[in-house]
Image (cartoon, rainbow, N blue to C red):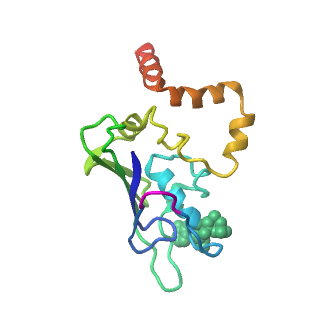
Protein backbone atom coordinates (compact mmCIF):
# COMPACT_ATOMS: atom_id res chain seq x y z
CA UNK A 1 0.00 0.00 0.00
CA UNK A 2 1.33 3.44 -0.82
CA UNK A 3 0.17 7.02 -1.28
CA UNK A 4 -0.51 7.44 -4.98
CA UNK A 5 -2.18 10.82 -5.34
CA UNK A 6 -3.34 13.81 -3.38
CA UNK A 7 -5.95 16.31 -4.61
CA UNK A 8 -6.33 19.53 -2.68
CA UNK A 9 -8.91 22.23 -3.32
CA UNK A 10 -9.69 25.22 -1.12
CA UNK A 11 -7.59 23.83 1.72
CA UNK A 12 -5.49 26.51 3.45
CA UNK A 13 -3.29 28.26 0.86
CA UNK A 14 -4.48 26.06 -2.05
CA UNK A 15 -7.28 28.10 -3.62
CA UNK A 16 -7.03 26.37 -6.95
CA UNK A 17 -7.26 22.61 -7.23
CA UNK A 18 -3.86 20.93 -7.21
CA UNK A 19 -3.10 17.28 -7.88
CA UNK A 20 0.11 15.67 -6.75
CA UNK A 21 1.07 12.28 -8.15
CA UNK A 22 3.59 10.38 -6.09
CA UNK A 23 5.97 8.16 -8.03
CA UNK A 24 7.83 5.33 -6.37
CA UNK A 25 10.71 6.10 -4.03
CA UNK A 26 11.13 9.21 -1.93
CA UNK A 27 9.41 12.53 -2.68
CA UNK A 28 10.80 15.74 -1.26
CA UNK A 29 8.76 18.94 -1.12
CA UNK A 30 10.84 22.09 -1.33
CA UNK A 31 9.93 25.77 -1.42
CA UNK A 32 10.41 29.10 0.36
CA UNK A 33 9.09 29.71 3.86
CA UNK A 34 5.33 30.11 3.88
CA UNK A 35 4.86 28.60 0.43
CA UNK A 36 2.61 25.78 1.66
CA UNK A 37 4.86 22.76 2.27
CA UNK A 38 3.45 22.03 5.71
CA UNK A 39 -0.07 22.71 4.41
CA UNK A 40 0.37 19.61 2.23
CA UNK A 41 1.14 17.36 5.20
CA UNK A 42 -1.69 19.05 7.15
CA UNK A 43 -4.04 18.11 4.31
CA UNK A 44 -3.05 14.43 4.61
CA UNK A 45 -3.66 14.42 8.34
CA UNK A 46 -6.94 16.28 7.88
CA UNK A 47 -8.40 13.95 5.26
CA UNK A 48 -7.59 11.02 7.56
CA UNK A 49 -9.93 12.57 10.09
CA UNK A 50 -7.88 14.97 12.22
CA UNK A 51 -10.31 16.78 14.52
CA UNK A 52 -7.78 18.74 16.54
CA UNK A 53 -7.38 22.26 15.14
CA UNK A 54 -4.21 22.65 17.15
CA UNK A 55 -2.62 19.72 15.26
CA UNK A 56 -3.60 21.53 12.06
CA UNK A 57 -1.97 24.74 13.30
CA UNK A 58 -5.24 26.66 13.43
CA UNK A 59 -7.59 27.97 16.09
CA UNK A 60 -10.90 26.81 14.59
CA UNK A 61 -11.84 24.23 11.93
CA UNK A 62 -12.83 27.03 9.52
CA UNK A 63 -9.14 28.00 9.39
CA UNK A 64 -8.49 25.13 6.98
CA UNK A 65 -10.67 26.81 4.33
CA UNK A 66 -8.89 29.21 1.96
CA UNK A 67 -9.42 32.60 3.57
CA UNK A 68 -8.71 34.78 0.53
CA UNK A 69 -5.95 37.13 -0.52
CA UNK A 70 -5.93 40.67 -1.91
CA UNK A 71 -6.51 39.14 -5.35
CA UNK A 72 -8.79 36.21 -4.56
CA UNK A 73 -12.06 35.86 -2.69
CA UNK A 74 -12.32 33.45 0.24
CA UNK A 75 -13.81 30.05 -0.59
CA UNK A 76 -16.85 28.36 0.95
CA UNK A 77 -15.38 24.92 1.47
CA UNK A 78 -12.20 22.88 1.54
CA UNK A 79 -11.83 19.45 0.01
CA UNK A 80 -9.01 16.93 0.05
CA UNK A 81 -8.86 13.50 -1.61
CA UNK A 82 -6.15 10.99 -0.88
CA UNK A 83 -5.68 8.02 -3.20
CA UNK A 84 -3.93 4.90 -1.94
CA UNK A 85 -2.73 1.98 -4.02
CA UNK A 86 -4.19 -1.10 -2.38
CA UNK A 87 -3.06 -3.80 -4.80
CA UNK A 88 -1.48 -5.69 -1.91
CA UNK A 89 -4.87 -5.57 -0.09
CA UNK A 90 -3.32 -4.21 3.10
CA UNK A 91 -6.58 -2.31 3.54
CA UNK A 92 -9.42 -4.73 4.28
CA UNK A 93 -11.50 -3.86 1.18
CA UNK A 94 -11.78 -5.37 -2.28
CA UNK A 95 -10.69 -2.28 -4.20
CA UNK A 96 -7.16 -2.12 -5.55
CA UNK A 97 -7.33 1.67 -5.29
CA UNK A 98 -8.91 3.38 -2.30
CA UNK A 99 -9.73 7.07 -2.26
CA UNK A 100 -10.76 8.94 0.83
CA UNK A 101 -12.34 12.39 0.61
CA UNK A 102 -13.19 14.95 3.25
CA UNK A 103 -15.03 18.21 2.65
CA UNK A 104 -15.79 20.90 5.19
CA UNK A 105 -18.06 23.94 4.88
CA UNK A 106 -17.86 27.21 6.79
CA UNK A 107 -20.80 26.03 8.88
CA UNK A 108 -18.35 23.48 10.32
CA UNK A 109 -20.11 20.50 8.79
CA UNK A 110 -17.72 17.79 7.52
CA UNK A 111 -18.50 15.17 4.88
CA UNK A 112 -16.48 12.00 4.37
CA UNK A 113 -16.34 9.61 1.44
CA UNK A 114 -14.65 6.29 0.75
CA UNK A 115 -14.39 5.67 -3.01
CA UNK A 116 -17.02 8.40 -3.54
CA UNK A 117 -19.56 6.77 -1.21
CA UNK A 118 -20.65 8.94 1.66
CA UNK A 119 -19.54 7.54 5.02
CA UNK A 120 -18.90 8.44 8.64
CA UNK A 121 -15.61 9.46 10.23
CA UNK A 122 -15.89 6.20 12.16
CA UNK A 123 -15.73 4.23 8.89
CA UNK A 124 -12.53 5.99 7.91
CA UNK A 125 -11.01 5.30 11.32
CA UNK A 126 -11.97 1.63 11.04
CA UNK A 127 -10.59 1.34 7.52
CA UNK A 128 -7.15 2.43 8.66
CA UNK A 129 -7.12 0.79 12.06
CA UNK A 130 -4.02 -1.41 12.59
CA UNK A 131 -2.47 -0.30 9.29
CA UNK A 132 -0.33 2.52 10.65
CA UNK A 133 -1.98 4.95 8.23
CA UNK A 134 -4.61 6.73 10.38
CA UNK A 135 -4.15 10.32 11.53
CA UNK A 136 -2.27 9.09 14.62
CA UNK A 137 -0.65 6.17 12.80
CA UNK A 138 3.11 5.86 12.68
CA UNK A 139 3.17 6.51 8.93
CA UNK A 140 2.89 10.24 9.68
CA UNK A 141 5.70 11.42 11.90
CA UNK A 142 5.34 15.13 12.55
CA UNK A 143 7.94 17.48 13.97
CA UNK A 144 8.55 16.60 17.61
CA UNK A 145 6.76 13.25 17.34
CA UNK A 146 10.00 11.23 17.73
CA UNK A 147 10.68 12.94 21.07
CA UNK A 148 7.09 12.33 22.04
CA UNK A 149 7.36 8.62 21.24
CA UNK A 150 10.62 8.30 23.16
CA UNK A 151 9.56 10.22 26.20
CA UNK A 152 5.80 9.67 26.42
CA UNK A 153 4.08 7.59 29.06
CA UNK A 154 4.44 3.82 28.76
CA UNK A 155 0.68 3.64 28.02
CA UNK A 156 1.11 5.90 24.94
CA UNK A 157 4.08 3.89 23.74
CA UNK A 158 2.04 0.74 24.13
CA UNK A 159 -0.62 2.19 21.79
CA UNK A 160 1.99 2.54 19.04
CA UNK A 161 3.07 -1.10 19.44
CA UNK A 162 -0.54 -2.27 19.53
CA UNK A 163 -1.23 -0.53 16.22
CA UNK A 164 1.86 -2.15 14.69
CA UNK A 165 0.85 -5.55 16.06
CA UNK A 166 -2.61 -5.16 14.54
CA UNK A 167 -4.69 -5.62 17.67
CA UNK A 168 -6.34 -2.18 18.00
CA UNK A 169 -9.38 -3.47 16.08
CA UNK A 170 -10.05 -6.16 18.65
CA UNK A 171 -9.41 -3.87 21.59
CA UNK A 172 -11.84 -1.28 20.20
CA UNK A 173 -14.53 -3.90 19.55
CA UNK A 174 -14.12 -5.22 23.09
CA UNK A 175 -14.44 -1.71 24.54
CA UNK A 176 -17.53 -1.03 22.42
CA UNK A 177 -19.11 -4.32 23.49
CA UNK A 178 -18.46 -3.52 27.13
CA UNK A 179 -20.20 -0.15 26.77
CA UNK A 180 -23.40 -1.78 25.47
P1 LIG B 1 8.06 26.93 6.37
O1 LIG B 1 9.19 26.71 5.42
O2 LIG B 1 8.19 28.21 7.10
O3 LIG B 1 7.77 25.76 7.24
P2 LIG B 1 5.79 26.17 4.70
O4 LIG B 1 6.14 26.05 3.25
O5 LIG B 1 5.67 24.93 5.48
O6 LIG B 1 6.78 27.19 5.41
P3 LIG B 1 3.02 26.55 5.33
O7 LIG B 1 3.04 26.63 6.81
O8 LIG B 1 2.62 25.29 4.70
O9 LIG B 1 4.45 26.99 4.77
O10 LIG B 1 2.11 27.69 4.71
C1 LIG B 1 1.84 28.86 5.39
C2 LIG B 1 1.05 29.77 4.48
O11 LIG B 1 -0.26 29.25 4.32
C3 LIG B 1 0.94 31.16 5.06
O12 LIG B 1 1.31 32.07 4.05
C4 LIG B 1 -0.51 31.31 5.38
O13 LIG B 1 -0.99 32.58 5.14
C5 LIG B 1 -1.14 30.35 4.40
N1 LIG B 1 -2.45 29.88 4.91
C6 LIG B 1 -2.70 29.12 5.99
N2 LIG B 1 -4.03 28.94 6.16
C7 LIG B 1 -4.63 29.62 5.15
C8 LIG B 1 -5.99 29.85 4.76
N3 LIG B 1 -7.01 29.33 5.46
N4 LIG B 1 -6.23 30.60 3.67
C9 LIG B 1 -5.20 31.12 2.96
N5 LIG B 1 -3.91 30.96 3.26
C10 LIG B 1 -3.62 30.21 4.34
MG1 LIG C 1 6.57 24.23 7.27
* Camera-nearest residue between 62 and 167: 167
Q: Give the range drawn in magenta.
A: 23-27
Q: In the rendered view of the protein, which quadrant contains the N terminus?
A: top left
**Furthest residue toward right:** 151
70, 148: nearer the viewer: 148
Left or right of residue 132: residue 152 = right
Q: Which residue is drawn at 58% across and 62% down?
A: 38
Query: In the image, is residue 180 above or below residue 101?
Result: above
Q: Nearer the viewer, residue 130 or 23?
A: 23
Q: Residue at x 45, y 13 (%)?
A: 178
Q: Position of residue 170 (x, y in %)?
A: 43, 20
Q: Is residue 80 at least partly visible in the picture? A: no
Based on the picture, tell me whether residue 24 belongs to the magenta stretch: yes
Question: Image point 69% across, 43% down: which residue?
Answer: 146
- Residue drawn at (70%, 40%) of the image: 148
Q: In the image, 172: left or right of 30? A: left
Residue 2 x %, y %: 41, 49
Q: Where is residue 138 in the image (x, y as percent from the top left)?
A: 56, 40
Q: How many marks?
A: 0
Based on the displayed image, in which of its 4 quarters is residue 129 positioned? top left
Q: Main secondary structure of the magenta part?
A: loop
Q: 136 or 120: nearer the eye?
A: 136
Amino acid sequence: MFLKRLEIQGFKSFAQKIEIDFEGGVTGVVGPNGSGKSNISDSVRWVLGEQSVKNLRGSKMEDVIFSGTSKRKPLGYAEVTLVLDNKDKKLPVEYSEVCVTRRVFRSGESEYYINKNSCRLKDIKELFMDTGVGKDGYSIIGQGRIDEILSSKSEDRRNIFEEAAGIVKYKTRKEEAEKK
